[in-house]
Image (cartoon, grey):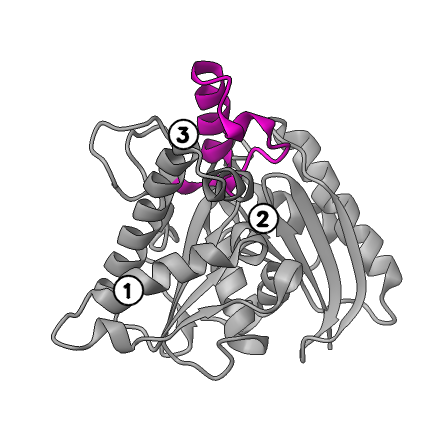
Amino acid sequence: MVRIGLDVGATKTVGLLCTESGRVLHRVRQKSAVKDPDKLYADIRNLIQKLTGESPERPAAACIGIAAFVDHATGHIHYAPNLQVENFPLGERLQRDLGMPIHIDNDVNCGVLGEARFGAARGVQHVVGLFIGTGIGAGIVTHGHLLRGARGIAAEAGHTLFIPGGRMCGCGRRGCFEAYAGGRFIRESVVRACRAHPKSRLCAEEAKNLTGVWRAMSDGDPVARAIWDKAILALRVLVTNLVTLFDPEMVLLGGTIIHELPQVADAVREFLVAQRLRGILHTIPLTQAVLGGDAVALGAACLPDQP
C-alpha cells in the first residue's frame, strides 16, 4: 500500500511517496508559503496531486505533519505561529477537493512517530521527543501511541513557560521556551547583540543561528556565550521537566539544530545525568534522531494507524 506523507514546516515543505514499511518511492522539496493561508493550501494540494501522479497505484491516504496547533480529528489548524496561519480548515478543504482520506497532525508529533516506527526509537513504547529548528516542538509516545490531549495540542512543550513575563513568543505569550532556544529567536538575539556590540566575534559569523553562536563562543566571545548559555539552559530545563512528567524509556532529540550541532545534545545530556531523581533521571538514554529530513513526512504517513 502506498501513502503520501508531507512535512509542512516554517521554511520548507517535504513530500514523500512511500510504502507502509517506510520505503521512499519519490521525494519532493519546496519552500513553504508563510502568512498566506490560501497560497499555503494551494501549494499543499498541488504537491499531493503531483505525488499522486508519481504513484504506481492510487495512494491510500495523504498525510500531513504541519508546524501548527492542529485538531488531528478534523485537520483544522487552530494556529501556526511560525507559518502565521490561524483558524484554517485545511483538512476539510483537502478532503473536498481531492476526494481521498486526509490525516493531519502536528509536525513534531509526526517526527517522533516516524522515529518510533522506523528510526532511532523503533520498538520503544514510551518516548519523549524534542525537535529543535525554527521553533521547538515535542511529541510524546506512550504505549506506542501519540499523546494528543483533548484538542490535539498536548505536546506543545516549546510554548510552556520558561520565564514569566519574558521575551515575546510567536504564540502571543511571553516567556516560552521557544522564545529562548528556537531558531527564529536565536537569530533575533544575534541581530540585536550585533547592533549593541558591533565588535563582537559573533557579528563576523555568516550563520545567524546556534551554530554561529557556538563558533563565536568557542573563540572566547562573551556576547555569544551569553546567548548560548540562555538557550542551553532553556533546553536543559525543558528536557528535564518532560522526563519528570512522562517517565519515558528514551529522550529523542531531533531537528536542524541537533543534526548540525551535536554539542547541544551533549550539553543537555550532561545536565540530565546530573539531575538525580531518586537515582532515575540519569539512567534514561538521550538519543539523536536518525531519519533526518524525512522523519516528519514518514511519521505523517503512519497517522492512519494511530487511534
Quadrant including the N terminus: bottom right
The residue that label 1 is drawn on is 272
- Please indicate, yes or no, whether residue 219 appears anywhere in the rendered image: yes
Question: Which kind of residue does numbered mark 1 sit on?
Answer: Leu
In the image: residue 105, left or right of residue 272 = right
Sequence order check, earlier mark of 3 and 1: 3
Residues in magenta? 181-210
Question: What residue is at 26 percent from the left and 28 percent from the top?
Answer: 166
Q: Can you tell which mark lies on residue 60?
A: none
Does the stretch in magenta take in 254?
A: no
Nearer the camera: disc 3 or disc 1: 3
The residue that label 2 is drawn on is 91
Q: Can you tell which mark lies on residue 223?
A: 3
- Please indicate, yes or no, whether residue 86 appears anywhere in the rendered image: no
Residue 156 coordinates in the image, percent (x, y): 37, 49
Question: Which kind of residue does numbered mark 2 sit on?
Answer: Gly
